[in-house]
Image (cartoon, grey):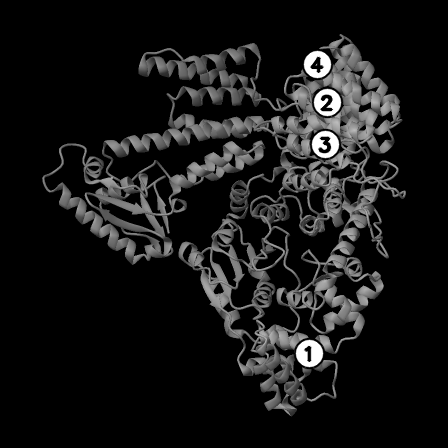
Amino acid sequence: MEFRLLGTVSVETFTGPLPLGPAKRRSLLAALLLSANTPVSVGRLTDSLWDDTPPLQARGVIQGHVSRLRALLVGADAEAYGVELATLGDAYVLRVPETLIDAQRFEELLMLAREQRSPADTVLMLKEALSLWQGPALSGAFAGPPLRAAAHSLEESRLATVEQLARTYGVLGEHHRAAALLAAETAAHPLRESLAAELMLALYRAGRQSEALDRFHRTRRLLADELGIDPGHKLADAYALILRGDGGSGEPGAGPGPRPVAAPAGTRSSAPVRATAPVGAAPSAGAAAPAGAVAPADAAAPAGAVAPGPDSAGPSGAAGDVPVGGGGAAASPAALRPSAVAPAPHPGEPLPVDLLPRAPRGFHGRGAELAALTRAAAGEAPVCLVTGPAGVGKTALALQWAHRSGALFPDGRLFADLRGFSEAGEPALIDVLREFLLALGVAPRRVPESAPAAAALFRSLTDRRRVLVVLDNARDSATVRALLPGGSDCVTLVTSRHRLEGLIASDAARPVPLDTLEADDGTALLAGVLGEERVLAEPVAARRLAELCGGLPLALRVTAARLAGRPRWTLAALADELADEQGRLAYLDVDDTGVAAALRLTVQHLPPDAVHQFARLGHHPGGHFDPYAAAALAGTDPVAAAAALERLAAAHLVSETAPGRWILHDLVRLYARGLDPASAHEALTGVLDHCIATALAAADTAEPGGEPCFVLPDGYREPAAVRDFADRAEAMRWLAAERENLALAAVAARAAGLEDRTWRIILLQWPQVVWRVRDNWAPLLELALESARAGKDAYAESRVLTLLGWVLTEEGRTIEAAAVLERSPVLAREAGDPLGEATALINLAVVQAELGELPTALENCTRAVELCREEADRHTEMLGLQHLARMQLTAGRPQEALACARTALDLGPEHEEAVRRSLLLAVCGEARIALGEEEDGIRLLDRAAREAEHAGYDDGAVRALEALVRVSARTEYRRRYDEALRRLTDEG
């Protein structure tokens, strides 16, 4: 059900619009909706329904309309949506969720647009807001004075939104699109000067100066003829700007200032261990990157593409990273796209995305439920709700249907385990939405930071597409609502142990209850695993086994797997054993006795090594595990762990969801945990140290060449074997796939008082932080900071503060970043960490330069360079010199900037540091031009642009080419600039 005010006043339902009848009834509805959930007096309703003196029977007319409207709503099952038209004394109130009113959703989207830091995200929000309009507001109603005022206010808001959208298009350099948008609105509102002014500027910036000037003169004549007035200041200012040849602030490149960076050095070690974190800057919208950080191969990077180096932007920041307060990752956008996803398609093209786990093996029966799902999915934007107790097979049913119905969803299938009933805790909503958006082709820096904005973008991307969204293990309706797609042809399949009645009421979810299997179906499942001959030989015993397992597929599969490996066992003997075991567990009041009995009997007959492995798996803090993690939990090696996992899989105690990736059912995990509770601390410590060792190896492969050694935590237990990563791409894939597990491991370490493990596990993810900086890392880094402080470790606290400060800067939270970074150099000095101090000073200096504290920034950056020279660390020295050169250029000291950049270049960057070289060459070129040496400056800028283009670093190419376009009229530079800008905006 939807109430519409932005167009014809109407109430839309699944069966079509309600027959509201005469205009005055629509007026009544509009007046109530404009004051939704607030009592509206009869007097105000009278003013809304009559323009002149109301008739004597006005109250009776209003009562009649209210009565008819109430009957229409009741007939449309409005109560299920939380809608009620109530009488309160001498007033009426329409109680309705604001999400059902298009005008309220319009305002919400405008609010979200204001919160976006990326112009592309702002465009998406504004376009979705304007798409709600289907004509003049409050059409079809008789507009008394209050409604006329409301309609005018809504129209003003719409026009202001159009102007805002046009300005944001301008920020992205899409001036032709802005002009097309404004031309249509200007034709409808020829006397609105603000629209005409925006159109003039858009036309001028699109290279259509004569049209822009003609628009001014036409509007001036119209104002004089119709109103007898001269142009106002907005129109006059736009005309003056065009005559001066000044495009105004909407040009691309007027972005935020410098972007810091700082990858932590991770952990120190008394035993030499290869360092993984160079103390350089990390890539992202002008942020410094570890030199030579090659884009992950799984991210579809161009051959030879490298991570963007530090970009301490001057007054005109990197193009494409302009408004609303922060940049995202400035790595080559193509280099940041997930490997499983092709570039974002144009409308109508399929989305090659499939996040479904593999189809369940040994699935039998449930024909009625599968058919019910198919029927439920046939409606408009249906939400199908599979409910039932734990172990009944909800996930298996959902996945079976999803895999069978793949042809219905050519635009993709998404899957998320919401872990609503898991001890590991539910994932953050923004994390689920982020994975969906990345899978749909959204570049990491274009993913909004807030869950509401990400949800709105998700709805927009799935509009007019046929996508299946499977939400497994949902605990409540609110979480599901935020993850619903926007297209009417999309299907959402939800599984839950709860009935989720709120979802049924608000979104007309179609419940498909899943009960335990009847004895016949349970027997059929046994036959599917054991073979029909064996079951037909003992039909009574087979039926009894099905009953003893409580009709739960989980218990039946465990039991069947045990029998399958013992062909000489009779079903009757196992039934007797299971009955005895079940009786004992029932006496102990164990939940899900059928499952517990089957598990206990199965475990009793496993070899000791498999039992040991199974018990330790119960203490794993994450959601999935591989043989390396299993070995660390059990204190064995990966070969032995893999063999044990295969044996456990044969007994249906673990499930392999992908090659080398295993999970435990929640009920199985609880049972395993209870087998050996005394080993919990030892198992947890083992898997935490495995996380540290593997993250060290991954970071060392992803970004080699950092500091020489680390101090590992007290009592560190070296794993028997550590995963070997062939290249950077494989290491980055592991870090991305294990992000959630590593976060859960860090939380478990903190809860167990293992502070020294907590901050190390978090900090060692820095290569992933570097490449996906706007991926909501701050909460995890704050947990690391708490642990470092709890352990009174100045080194750790400094390193965490340095990385956290940089992340906050990239998120546009510059003031917070400055407060965080001020403490970091002091702590590094206390800890005897000069390179950590240097990195902290560089990041602090970049933030201070953004805040206008240029003298202090220059001083700190100079001190950082001195520290690097004392430590003979060329990598960090180059980083410091580059930022220092940019700051000197900004301060109007081009000679010093040139000398500084030359010194950095003379340090001899390797060939893989083409990005940093490009940035330094650009500084040299701009400095030469500032010194009046225009020919040399153009040559250096052209060289900088070419190196950036070759490296796939579009931010750097745009910066250098923008400087070239300002001083040269060559069409080649304009063409290359436009191409680089288009790549940046299209892919970023």
Label whose residue precedes the other's in the sequence (3 or 2): 3
Q: Nearer the viewer, residue 935 or 956?
A: 956
Q: CA distance from mark 3 to mark 2?
A: 29 Å
- Name the disc covering residue 855, or none: 4
Amino acid at dot 3: Thr
Label whose residue precedes the other's in the sequence (3 or 4): 3
**Residue position marked by numbered label 3 in the rendering:** 802
- 509 in relation to 134, above or below: below
Of tags 3 and 2, the one toward the viewer is 3
**Residue position marked by numbered label 1 in the rendering:** 601
- 63 in relation to 160, above or below: below
Amino acid at dot 1: Leu
Look at the numbered disc 2 and give the secondary structure of its residue: helix
**Residue position marked by numbered label 2 in the rendering:** 960
Neighbor class of circle 1 (other Cα within 10 Å; few <14, some 14-19, many 20+) is some
Neighbor class of circle 2 (other Cα within 10 Å; few <14, some 14-19, many 20+) is many
Of tags 2 and 4, the one toward the viewer is 4
Of tags 2 and 1, the one toward the viewer is 1
Residue 273: image x %, image y %?
A: 88, 43
**For the view shown, which residue lies furthest in the left direction?**
56
Q: Nearer the viewer, residue 673 or 54?
A: 673
Label whose residue precedes the other's in the sequence (2 or 1): 1
Q: CA distance from mark 4 to mark 1?
A: 74 Å
Res. 26 image quadrant:
top left
Look at the numbered disc 1 and give the secondary structure of its residue: helix
Of the 4 image quadrants, the one containing the C terminus is top right
Q: Nearer the viewer, residue 244 or 971?
A: 244
Residue 309: image x %, image y %?
A: 76, 30
Do labels 2 and 4 touch, CB within 8 Å? no
Look at the numbered disc 3 and give the secondary structure of its residue: helix
Res. 872 image quadrant:
top right
